[in-house]
Image (cartoon, helix red, strand yellow):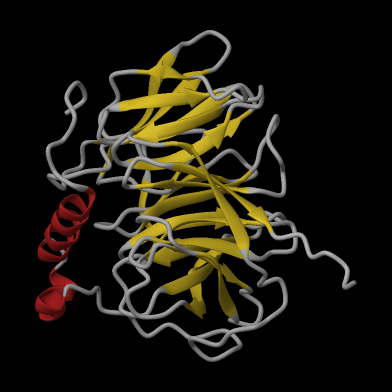
Amino acid sequence: MAQHELSLTAREMMAIIRIMALIQKTAVGAVLLGGLLATPSVPMASAAPGSTGNSGCSSWSVRTLISGQGWLENLAFDGRGSIMVSALSQGRLLKLTRSHKLSTLLAPVVAPGGEIRRGHLLYFNTGDTVPIAPTGTVDRFDLRTGRHVTWARGLTMPNGLAVLPDGDAIVTGLATGVTRVPARDPTHPQFNWAAVDGTNGIAVDYSGRRLYVDRTLSSDGEVDRILISHPGRVNVVGRLGAGVQPDDMAIDRQGILYVAGFGTGKIYRLDPRTGSSCVIAGGLTQPTSVRFGGPGWPSGDLFVTDASGHLSELTRARHLPSA
């Protein structure tokens, strides 16, 4: 798969991933026919499910930057003006410059998933595909020297990726709980560090104290908050609704979450303090990740990958004064 494009469509791949994840999770066997992951009893913080708020919910315009690239799973900014994109079905990492030149950054890569850059090092997941087996990794690529190494092994279909202030990595997965990979000993990942099943999107708040994850397979688009110092403390902070199938997310300095709705083709704004949410953009095709702009790109814009081969730029509507 690292050298040849997958013959499956985006919808077929996601369906297979979901079904196989459910089959291998005995705790959810009872809901297999419904195709949804059972939601554990987790307390809801603040507002009621499905509530909406008007603050910050203006529409964002959508501009396509690249297309026709197969399943695009994630993205990061290299700090030097380019966007790095996980081309899952191509088995490679792509690079898009500010002048819109697209090239291959690294290949072959087995089903690349989440990406995050720390300084001149890019961390990224591999093995984000079926069959579901502990063959996934977190790899590290030196953007200065081009040196590529495997940093952590033994992960099962690693999907989302975040790095904590202490350098530890956090990995989500549709078939596993949340995994923590210690920076001092990445050869011994802490599996099920937070016992939340079916996680996908992930974001660390700017205080470095709280971690947010969402659950693609939940019946109501659940988004959870995990206290990093006590990962057993998990609270639901939002429910985006049936059929949303939340994927990766971003967080701004005010603590507002922006979540890709794979199932609805929309981007959601969620205030985890109140549980209020709204749609800020639609008309996308199975969005998989969302990030705020990095160096060389507008920092207030959102950049979105999708499973149909697009990288899009979302710009907040600018309200003109009344005449």
Is 194 on the left or on the right of 153, as rendered? right
Task: Give the x, y percent position of residue 224.
Answer: 49, 71
Q: Residue farthest to the front?
A: 323
Q: Position of residue 315 (x, y in %)?
A: 65, 52
Quarter holding residue 128: top left
Kindly identify the residue that appears in the image at 39 percent across and 26 percent down.
Answer: 93
Q: Residue at x 16, y 48 (%)?
A: 132
> Is 93 left or right of 226, judged from the image as shown?
left
Which percent across, then down, holds residue 71? 30, 41
- How many numbered callouts? 0
Is residue 65 in view? yes
- 163 to 77, vertically: above or below: below
Image quadrant containing the N terminus: top left
* Above or below, 314 relative to 88: below
Query: Relative to the observer, which residue lies in front, 315 or 56?
Result: 315
Of residues 79 and 230, the one drawn nearer to the viewer in this rendering = 79
Quadrant where the C terminus lies? bottom right
